[in-house]
Image (cartoon, grey):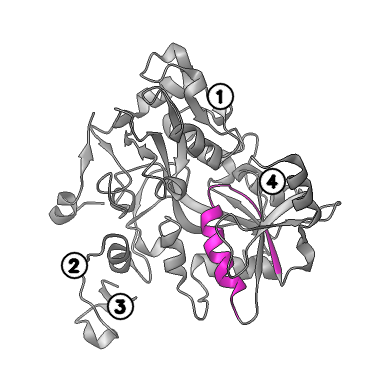
Amino acid sequence: MGLSTNKMSRLWVACAAASGSMLAAHAVHAANCTSLPNPIYVTGSSAVQPFLAGLGTVLAAGSNPITIVYKKQGSCTGGDAIVNDTKMTGTATYWTASSSVSGETCDLPTAGLPADVGASDVFWTSCAGSGPLPSNVGDFFGPVEVMTFVVPKASSHQSISAEAAYLTFGLGQAGKTPWVDETQLFVRNAQSGTQSEIGTAIKVPPSKFKGIDSGGSSGVLTSVSSATNVDKAIGILSTGETDDARDKIKELAYQHYGQSCGFWPDSSPTSFDKMNVRDGHYPIWGPLHMFAYVDKNGKATNSNALLLIDYVSGAKELQGANLVDVTIDAHLIPQCAMQVTRTSEIGALASYQPAAPCGCYFDKKTTGQTSCQACTNDSDCSTNHCRHGYCEAN
């Protein structure tokens, strides 16, 4: 998996409240989830909400509207919904064509509903006590999600090593790192994909993290950004949250075990190109996992699950919408822009050549620049294919 000189030169390296009555009224007037147009029920990862929001608004705007009904509970809960047929209950989020990322609220039946898809940031084997996936459950990959360590914007810290992260989140005050105040370590819980993936990277079991369970990604973001002792506060988030909050927080460059320097997910702390993820230098990432029941050939048996998986994986195009744009706008990386892949949590990297690459388009959309030739069809490219308006290598 060698890197060309021009790619290496691009790397920037870092070494070193509503009232109770209002809530009650909202609950009374929430929609019935089952009455929404063509609902597809999804539960699991909280980090995936910005992506589902973008996809949900697009699907709701179609000539035959589809509604994503989403229950945010944590990645391992998403896997459990399919593996153990655990029902979705309570309230859920859905999106119309004009919804914001936060969406609208609907009520699920009291007896609960089975999920069509369980969404997770991590492989099922990363969830405590999970064991292997049953033969009737498939794991379908979506776009790449990236997990990071974050500190307040005014913090003097710029980077963190795997060893320092282990001491901080594994030992807390006893770790004697710059982050010794355990009340200022803002984390998730053992069901969180963000915590499971970062825990795998730094060798701290997700159930053993020191710190305060912030109740979700938005809670971590709020706690870190509002911390008054800026050099003591640290949290864990995905770039789905951090990229839109760089005025409040900053990502730390991360130096993995065996690396001599730290890397940001992007080629610099101010860019959005995810270059260090895409070429394998930044290690804490993995695909969005979509769990669903499958037949003996590995095909999703639930028609709603199959439809959503085909859209998310890129196997099916959505007329009138560019799902690559939806993915990029949610600060995820479409598989077609990746140069490396892996088959286990924080596992070994292998070189990857997408069947229909979109790296040139990804560069242009996230940085405003690309070295690739613009095109309108294959005839404009000498030996390459025209994809998303640019000549790609394949």
Amino acid type indicated by mark 3: Gly
Q: Identify the image quadrant of residue 176.
A: top left
Is 181 positioned to the left or the right of 118 in the image?
left
Earlier-in-chain disc, 4 versus 1: 4
Give the class, few, some or many, for how many residues have Cα within 10 Å of label 3's Cα (few <14, many ≥20).
some
Question: Distance of mark 4 from mark 3, alpha carbons?
Answer: 41 Å
At 28% across and 44% down in the image, what residue appears? 269
Horizontal and vertical percent for residue 337? 35, 62
Label 3 or label 1, whichever lies nearer to me, is 3
Q: Position of residue 144 (x, y in %)?
A: 44, 54
> SS of the residue at dot 1?
helix
Image quarter of the C terminus: bottom left
Q: Which residue is mark 1?
A: 208
Q: Which is nearer the N-term, disc 2 or disc 1?
A: 1
4 or 2: tag closer to the N-terminus? 4
**From what the image shows, is residue 342 above or below residue 19?**
below
Q: Position of residue 377 (x, y in %)?
A: 29, 86
